[in-house]
Image (cartoon, helix red, strand yellow):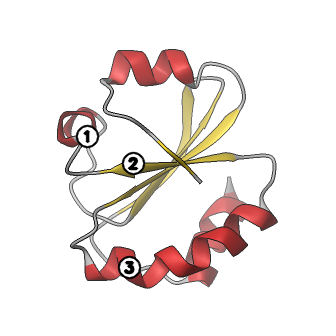
Amino acid sequence: MEKLPKVDKEKLLTQIADGKYMLFFSADWCPDCNFIKPRMPEIEAEYPEYKFLAVDRDENIDLAVELDVFGIPSFIAFEDGKEQGRFVNKDRKTKEQVEEFVNAL
């Protein structure tokens, strides 16, 4: 999974203006993030139509605020720069819950 460098919302939307992207907001200190991280390669493999971008919430705190991400781990799906859906809360997420979210898009 590619790690998103520190960006603001405008730069992010330019970067993801073409194609399907899944932003994965997390932080190293977050136990619920570390719960789902080992499953992320499997999830990525199941959804090759999406380019997954890891977003360090601490490094991109302004972006998280701009996108109303106040809990992690969280996922936001974009297609051609437009938000398609979000799975944003502070709860622990299972592989099955993430798959359910992506399948519902």
Q: What amino acid does circle 1 point to? A: Asn
Q: Earlier in the sequence, mark 3 or mark 1?
A: 3
Relative image position of residue 91 (x, y in whole percent): 32, 77
Relative image position of residue 48 (x, y in whole percent): 81, 53
The residue pinned by badge 3 equals: 34
Q: What amino acid does circle 2 point to? A: Val
Are the residues at dot 2 and dot 3 in contact (C-beta closer than 8 Å)?
no
Q: Gap between marks 2 and 3, in whole Å?
A: 14 Å
Relative image position of residue 96 (x, y in whole percent): 63, 82
Helix or strand or loop: what does disc 3 sit on? helix
Image check: 100 left or right of 81? right
Q: Residues within 10 Å of mark 3 (few under 14, many from 20)?
A: some
Helix or strand or loop: what does disc 1 sit on? loop
Q: Earlier in the sequence, mark 1 or mark 2?
A: 2
Image check: 101 left or right of 56? right
Q: Residues within 10 Å of mark 2 (few under 14, many from 20)?
A: many
Q: Gap between marks 3 and 1, in whole Å?
A: 18 Å
Towards the viewer: 1 or 51: 1
The residue pinned by badge 1 equals: 60
Q: Gap between marks 1 and 2, in whole Å?
A: 7 Å
Are the residues at dot 1 and dot 2 in contact (C-beta closer than 8 Å)?
yes
The residue pinned by badge 2 equals: 55
Helix or strand or loop: what does disc 2 sit on? strand
